[in-house]
Image (spheres, helix red, strand yellow):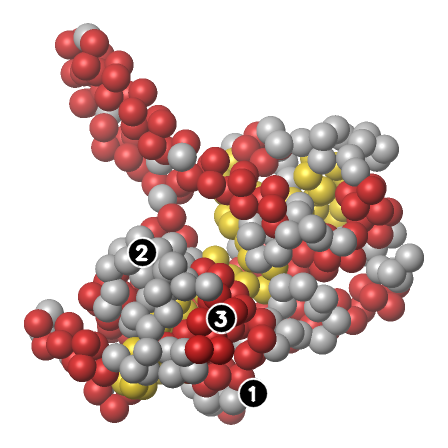
Amino acid sequence: MQQSSERCKIIVDAMGGDYAPENAVIGAVEAANENSGFDLFLVGIEKDITKVLKEKKLKFDTSRIINAPEVIEMGDSPTDAIKKKPNASIVIGSKYVKEKKAHAFVSAGNTGAMMAASTLIMGRLKNVGRPTIGAEIPNVHGTCHLFDVGAGKDAKPVHLFEYAVMGSIYAKELRNIPNPKVGILSMGEEESKGNEVTTAAFRLLKESKLNFVGNVEGRDILTGNVDVVVCDGFIGNILLKFGESVPKLLKHLLKQTADKNLIDKIKIGLFKSTLKRALKSLDYQEHGGVPLLGVNGISIIGHGSSTPKAIKNMVFRAYDMYKKDLNNKIENSLTDYLNIVDPNK
């Protein structure tokens, strides 16, 4: 779909998330009201969507509601649900992108189903063996982009190579990092450290045109000066879930300290707003969802408990990816890198 000839079209899954359709509808409409640069559509059970619009007194063109009478629940098996529920919002939204009726699909629904539908229905970009999902993790130098955090497991060296290319382009185009530093998550900085997959991927990345800095350790994600870190999705997902628990622990420790001593309680109270601002970068709502890179379309996957604010930021992220023409840049770059490095050796 050529960006120069038409406006960006973004579809939001109104039935996606623990608090659907309310949060999804409110967040989507807020996004459309704050930015007029794209056309927004809602896909889901039409009567449920219109009910939210009416109850919340939201202005939205109801001709942009795409009726999808089925819903893939959070507990459904992803691939089975796609086959058994062809009229579900996740399936229909993905088909609209596949058929070039839309540029982007945003959902906070069943993560596995969203990844499966995006990959199987939208298809993969040229030279992409496995799509990747990434997360932005704040660190002392800014942000570390971690790929993969759950799109796949048991990655091959070529997959880590692809993650590095796609993650580097994402960091450069959407986070304005001119020449992102790329590292492989391993158990030591030395080239020989790691398993067969990471050491083979090391050799591929070393020969590429990427700004490859070598192996990095877990601590470097929060404290190191590296912009993109690649790893197997099994490891990445565990790491991500661990990281998500950190803000809750910090809040618990602060409360525990305040409860023990009145003076500390007063001090913490005085700095409460400052602490809130400091921890803002750890709030998933600020980032919205995460992109599934490598699929032939824009696919943004959100947290199941997404608030309207998170949904809104998911829409904005999809629009940013469209404006930057990210998929074409990924496809062209992969072709370029593959001409230099043989990922199968």
Residue flagged by tag 3: what amino acid is it? Asp
Front position among marks 2 and 1: 2
Identify the mark at residue 2; answer none if there is no mark.
1
Q: Residue at x 36, y 44 (%)?
A: 283
Direction right: furthest residue: 345
User: Is label 1 in a helix, a strand or a loop?
Assistant: loop
Looking at the image, tell me whether mark 2 or mark 1 is earlier in sequence order: 1
Choose top left, top right, bottom left or bottom right for residue 335: bottom right
Looking at the image, tell me whether mark 3 or mark 1 is earlier in sequence order: 1
The reply to whether residue 175 is visible in this rendering is: yes
Front position among marks 3 and 1: 3
According to the picture, the residue beneath numbered tag 3 turns out to be 80
Gap between marks 2 and 1 measured at Cα: 31 Å
Q: Position of residue 113 (x, y in %)?
A: 47, 66
User: Is label 3 in a helix, a strand or a loop?
Assistant: helix
Gap between marks 3 and 2 measured at Cα: 25 Å
